[in-house]
Image: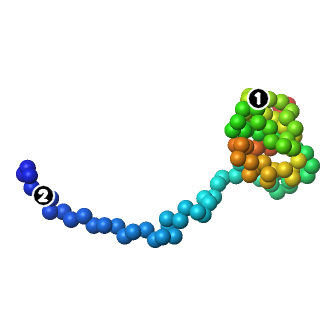
């Protein structure tokens, strides 16, 4: 019937706990380093070949030796394994993948 109010009552949800509203704790970010399990288990030392994707055209992080450009934001490079954690925390680096050699079939 038109004009009648519903007899249903709405229930309020309890307010979230203050800790749930705390946005100061950083959320866990996925790793930018794409390392396969074989690499992680037997990580080499020294310089390794990688594929680097960056967020800014022509950006090359310090300590990275460009081997070949694929595009303005994607290139192959050589990096020291000790620099991998620094690359992971670089805000302009999107991802770093360990390059795998291409073997003839």
At a point 48% along the width and 70% down the height, the residue shown is 18
Q: CA distance from mark 2 to mark 1?
A: 65 Å
Q: Nearer the viewer, mark 2 or mark 1?
A: 2
User: Please, what secondary structure does the residue beneath circle 1 have?
Assistant: strand
Q: Is residue 62 visible?
A: yes
At a point 73% along the width and 38% down the height, the residue shown is 53
Q: Quadrant of residue 48?
A: top right
Depth check: 48 or 4 in front? Answer: 4
Residue assigned mark 1: 70
Residue 98, percent from left and from top: 80, 44
Residue 19, percent from left and from top: 51, 70
How many labels sit on residues? 2
Q: Quadrant of residue 42?
A: bottom right
Of mark 2 and mark 1, the one earlier in the sequence is 2
Depth check: 34 or 58 in front? Answer: 58
Residue assigned mark 2: 5
């Amino acid at each position: 019937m038109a004009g009648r109010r519903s007899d249903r009552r709405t229930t309020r949800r309890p307010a979230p706990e203050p800790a749930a509203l705390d946005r100061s704790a950083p959320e866990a970010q996925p790793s930018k380093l794409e390392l396969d399990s074989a690499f992680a288990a037997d990580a080499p030392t020294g310089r390794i070949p990688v594929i680097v994707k960056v967020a800014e055209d022509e950006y090359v992080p310090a300590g990275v030796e460009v081997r070949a450009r694929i595009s303005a934001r994607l290139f192959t490079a050589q990096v020291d394994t000790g620099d991998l954690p620094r690359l992971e925390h670089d805000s302009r680096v999107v991802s770093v993948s360990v390059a795998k050699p291409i073997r003839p079939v």
